[in-house]
Amino acid sequence: MKPAESYILRQSEPFKSILLHLQILIERTFSKLMLQFKWKIPFYYMNNKPFCYLNVSEKKGYIDVGFWISVPLKKYNKFLI
């Protein structure tokens, strides 16, 4: 199993379910992404460049979905806050 997938599967609930759902949404929405494990968190790469990351903060009770680059997101601007 890849380290990024292992990271997701070893999270406690509800974080694991949320991460799995986010993984499906991201991979279906954006083609040609590669899931890697960088800086101890799952990182998606597009065209060998960082695209977004998933980071669990159990103490604060949330998951960060951080986008590294915004160019591929321009057509989704109406959904971004």
Image (cartoon, rainbow, N blue to C red):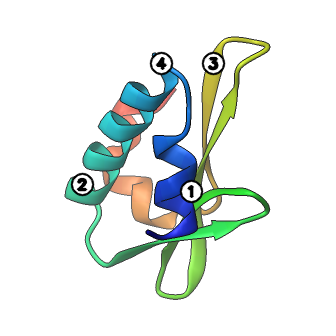
Q: Check if mark 2's residue and mark 4's residue have beta carbons within 8 Å.
A: no
The amino acid type found where label 3 is placed reads Tyr
Mark 3 against mark 2, which lies toward the viewer?
3
Q: Which residue is mark 1?
A: 52
The amino acid type found where label 2 is placed reads Thr
Q: Which residue is mark 3?
A: 62
Mark 2–mark 4 distance (CA, rounded to whole Å): 24 Å
Q: Is residue 24 above or below residue 78?
A: below
Counting from the top left corner in percent of width and height, residue 74 is at 41, 55
Q: Which residue is mark 2?
A: 29
Which badge, 2 or 1, is on the more N-terminal residue? 2
Report whether 68 appears left or right of 12: right
Mark 3–mark 2 distance (CA, rounded to whole Å): 22 Å
Q: Which residue is mark 4?
A: 13
Which badge, 2 or 4, is on the more N-terminal residue? 4
Q: Nearer the viewer, residue 69 or 6?
A: 6
The amino acid type found where label 1 is placed reads Cys
Residue reaching furthest left?
Answer: 28
Mark 2–mark 1 distance (CA, rounded to whole Å): 13 Å
Which badge, 3 or 2, is on the more N-terminal residue? 2
In the structure shown, which secondary structural element does the residue marked by tag 3 occupy? strand
Mark 1 against mark 3, which lies toward the viewer?
3
Mark 1–mark 3 distance (CA, rounded to whole Å): 16 Å
